[in-house]
Image (cartoon, helix red, strand yellow):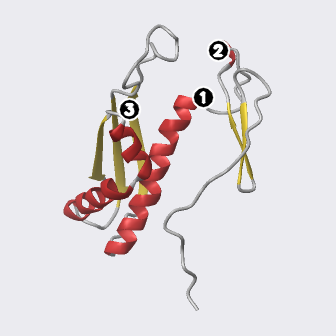
Amino acid sequence: MAMKIKPVVTYRTTAQCPTHARTEIPIRDLDVIVDEPVERGGTNLGPSPTETAMAALIACTNVIGHKNAHRLGIDLGTVTIDAKCRLDRRGVLMEEEIDVPFPDIELTVKCDTPAGQEELTRVGEETAKYCAIAKLFEAAGTDLTVNWVKTN
């Protein structure tokens, strides 16, 4: 008998905040630490909140990209993702409220693959429809560009 997957779920956790810079977040059986670097008063035990947001976008692009490639019968081969992001730090520095803290982000998804460039472009188009983190950034006003590139 097939298990029915719920289309909408609720995530819950309770984070501990032992310092002004470090947040310890239990997720499933993992302990996620988000922290600031030492020069900003942290202990450098994990990425900063803004770095974590970028990491989430990269990871979501990877996961959803692979799911779409599998669904389309496309072998992505070896994948690397380069990220370039501009962060308007005036908000996090409390200088002024910023409506779009990440004005632009560019990801380059490099695939060493037997697939053709047209197939990779198709995977990219499908991934743009379903990557939840990309949708968050775009809804916030970020100019997000994701290029899928064949490298061999």
Whether tag 2 and tag 1 are in contact, CB under 8 A, the answer is: yes
Q: Amino acid at mark 3?
A: Lys
- The disc, 2 or 3, on the residue closer to the chain's N-terminal end is 2
Disc 2/disc 3 C-alpha distance (Å):
22 Å
Name the residue: 74% across, 23% down. Answer: 43
Tell which tag, 1 or 3, sits nearer the viewer: 1
Give the quadrant of the C terminus.
bottom left
Whether tag 2 and tag 3 are in contact, CB under 8 A, the answer is: no
Disc 2/disc 1 C-alpha distance (Å):
10 Å
Query: Circle 3 sits on which residue?
Result: 84
Name the residue: 23% across, 58% down. Answer: 121
SS at badge 2: helix
Name the residue: 38% across, 46% down. Answer: 134
- The disc, 2 or 1, on the residue closer to the chain's N-terminal end is 2
Residue 111 picture location, percent across and down = 35, 56
Q: Is residue 52 above or below residue 27?
A: above
- The disc, 1 or 3, on the residue closer to the chain's N-terminal end is 1
Residue 126 picture location, percent across and down = 29, 61
Q: Amino acid at mark 2?
A: Arg
Query: Circle 2 sits on which residue?
Result: 40
Query: Circle 1 sits on which residue?
Result: 48
Residue farthest toward the left in the current orientation of the protein: 118
Residue farthest toward the top in the current orientation of the protein: 95
When asked about the image quadrant of residue 57, the answer is: top left
SS at badge 1: loop
Q: Nearer the viewer, residue 101 or 40?
A: 101
